[in-house]
Image (spheres, rainbow, N blue to C red):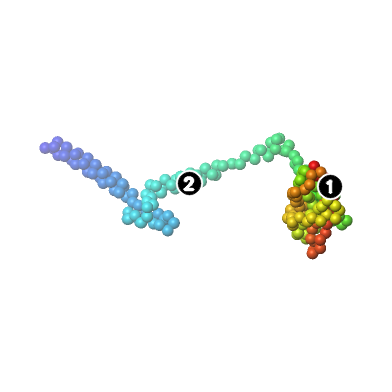
């Protein structure tokens, strides 16, 4: 009888211990509640009622905090190696800055014929008749240059005599003051004269007369 009692007591004690352990661990697992975690203006309640889609458990929060502290601790171990400033390669570097000396300015209009500038300088003609180009038996290209920024209407006069007599339509000048005109219907093997003209401030000014011969 006494042995049976001892066996019962041992079994009861083991059962109570197992039951206590079960209750303890089951309570510990159920205590992993959802804590309030703010995400901007959103919040997850501790009762487990989800107010947003962002659910963070206590273990997740602890893991996040540990990761942050680990990163923060690693930053303290960062050291800057300044030995490069004592390196011979660094100390031997030289300043190769080249000082640019001031030089005189070139031509104001590099596209104008030699001796012609734009805008006009003292002593230079306001309108220049340039040499003709692309001369054939019946065609030619007239060329002119204006050394006056106020000019707007440009044209050419030409003919077989110095009186000229034929006036081309108005020609649009370029930004650098040059203007051209392609003339058709000339007579082969004929000597022609022409000049470039422009209306400047209401007055017509022309360059010198230039001659050429068709092919």
Q: Nearer the viewer, residue 115 or 155?
A: 155
- Say above or below: 201 vs 96: below
- Say above or below: 21 vs 44: above
**Residue 185: where, in percent of width, then height?**
75, 49
Q: Nearer the viewer, residue 139 or 19?
A: 139
Disc sitting over residue 64 in the figure? none
Crowd band around label 2 with a 10 angstrom C-alpha radius: few (<14), some (14–19), many (20+): few
Q: Residue at x 41, y 55 (%)?
A: 38
- Say above or below: 209 vs 91: below
Check disc 1 and report its element: helix, strand or loop: strand
Disc sitting over residue 69 in the figure? 2
Q: CA distance from mark 1 to mark 2?
A: 97 Å
Q: Quadrant of residue 41?
A: bottom left
Q: Quadrant of residue 155?
A: bottom right
Q: Residue at x 78, y 50 (%)?
A: 142
Q: Residue at x 22, y 43 (%)?
A: 16
Check disc 2 and report its element: helix, strand or loop: helix
Residue corresponding to mark 1: 191
**Residue 88: where, in percent of width, then height?**
71, 35
Image quadrant holding the N terminus, namely top left
**Residue 214: where, in percent of width, then height?**
80, 44
């Amino acid at each position: 009888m006494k042995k049976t009692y001892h066996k019962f007591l041992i079994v009861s004690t083991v059962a109570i211990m197992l039951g206590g352990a079960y209750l303890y661990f089951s309570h510990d697992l159920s205590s992993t509640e959802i804590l309030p975690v703010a995400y901007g203006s959103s919040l997850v309640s501790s009762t487990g009622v989800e107010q947003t889609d962002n659910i963070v458990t206590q273990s997740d929060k602890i893991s996040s905090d540990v990761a942050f502290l680990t990163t923060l601790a690693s930053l303290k171990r960062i050291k800057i190696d300044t030995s490069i400033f004592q390196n011979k390669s660094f100390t031997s570097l030289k300043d190769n800055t080249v000082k640019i000396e001031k030089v005189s300015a070139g031509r104001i209009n590099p596209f104008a014929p030699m001796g012609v500038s734009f805008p006009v300088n003292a002593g230079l003609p306001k309108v220049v008749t340039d040499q003709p180009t692309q001369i054939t038996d019946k065609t030619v290209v007239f060329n002119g240059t204006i050394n006056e920024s106020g000019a707007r209407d440009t044209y050419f006069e030409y003919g077989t005599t110095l009186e000229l007599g034929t006036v081309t339509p108005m020609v649009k000048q370029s930004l650098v003051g040059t203007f051209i005109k392609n003339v058709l219907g000339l007579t082969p093997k004929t000597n022609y004269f022409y000049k470039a003209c422009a209306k400047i401030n209401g007055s017509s000014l022309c360059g010198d007369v230039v001659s050429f011969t068709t092919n």
